[in-house]
Amino acid sequence: SCTMSGSRSFLGESPAQRQLRRRNTLIEAALDLIQEGGLVAIGVRSVSKRANLSARYFYESFASVEDLVILMLREVFDELMAQGMNALHEADNGSIQPLVETEILARFHYGLHAALAVVLNDARKIALIASANADRGAVGQELRGMVLMVADAIATDPRAPDAGIDHTSALFIAGGIVEVTLAHVTGELTLDREALVKRLAPMSFGAIKASS
C-alpha cells in the first residue's frame, strides 16, 4: 500500500527516489537563478522558492549553497568529459595505428564539438562556469580543479603519447578551451559554434606541436 512514512513508497516513488527528484529540482532552480543573476542570485531561500520546496528540503541534499554550486560544476564537467572523450574514442573507430596529423586534428574536432555542445546547448551551464570563473573563493578554486581534471584526462588518454600530448600541453588546451568558450558566449568572439571548433582544433594541435 502507499504511505508517506518509513521506507515504503508513496505514489510509486521510494523515499530515495523522492529525495533525488527534489535534489534535481533544486539544481534546475539554481541553474535558472544563476543564469538570471549570477552566484549572488542564489541562496537557500531563493533556490527553495524557485523549486517550490521548503528550505528544509534544501538541506536534505546540500550542506550549503556553496556545496550546491560545487556539485553542479562537477556534474557539468563530468558530462563534458564523458561526451568529449567518447567522441574522441569514436573518432578512432577502433584503430590502434599511429595517428597522423589529419587524424589528430579530426580527434580534436570531434571531441571539442561534443564537449562544447554540453554547455553551448544550455545557456545556464555556461552561466555557471562564467560565474565560477569570476569567483575568488571556493567555487573559483573548484573550477580551476575541474580544468586540471580535464587536462589530466587528456594527458592520460591512451592515444595521448601517440598524438604528442603531455601534461603541459593538455593543461594549456583545457584552460584555453574554457577561456575561449567564455569569450564566445559573452560576445567577445563573434564566431558561430562550428567556426569556434574549427579554430580551437588547430590551436590545440599547435599547442602539442610547440611542446614536443
Image (cartoon, rainbow, N blue to C red):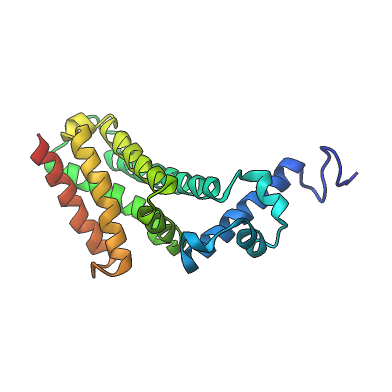
Give residue 33's position: percent from left, percent from top: 53, 64
| Residue that sits furthest to the right in the current view | 1
| Residue 117 visible in the shown view | no
Give whichever of 117, 173 is nearer the camera.
Answer: 173
Q: Which residue is rendered at x = 71% and y = 58% of the image?
A: 53
Vertical comparison of 140 with 182: above or below = above
Q: Residue at x 55, y 58 (%)?
A: 30
- Residue 192, position as x, y percentages in the image: 27, 67
State the count of labels.
0
The answer to whether residue 29 is left or right of residue 16 is left
Identify which residue is drawn at 38% across, 61% down: 120
Q: Quadrant of the N terminus?
A: top right
Q: Which quadrant would the C terminus be assigned to in this image?
A: top left
30 and 153: which one is in front? Answer: 30
Left or right of 207: which side holds 17?
Answer: right
The image shows residue 152, relative to residue 23, as above or below, that is above
Q: Is residue 59 above or below residue 184?
A: above
1 w.r.t. 180: above or below: above
Left or right, 204 with reference to 86: left
Q: Residue at x 36, y 56 (%)?
A: 134
Q: Quadrant of residue 91?
A: top left
Q: Position of residue 166 (x, y in %)?
A: 19, 32
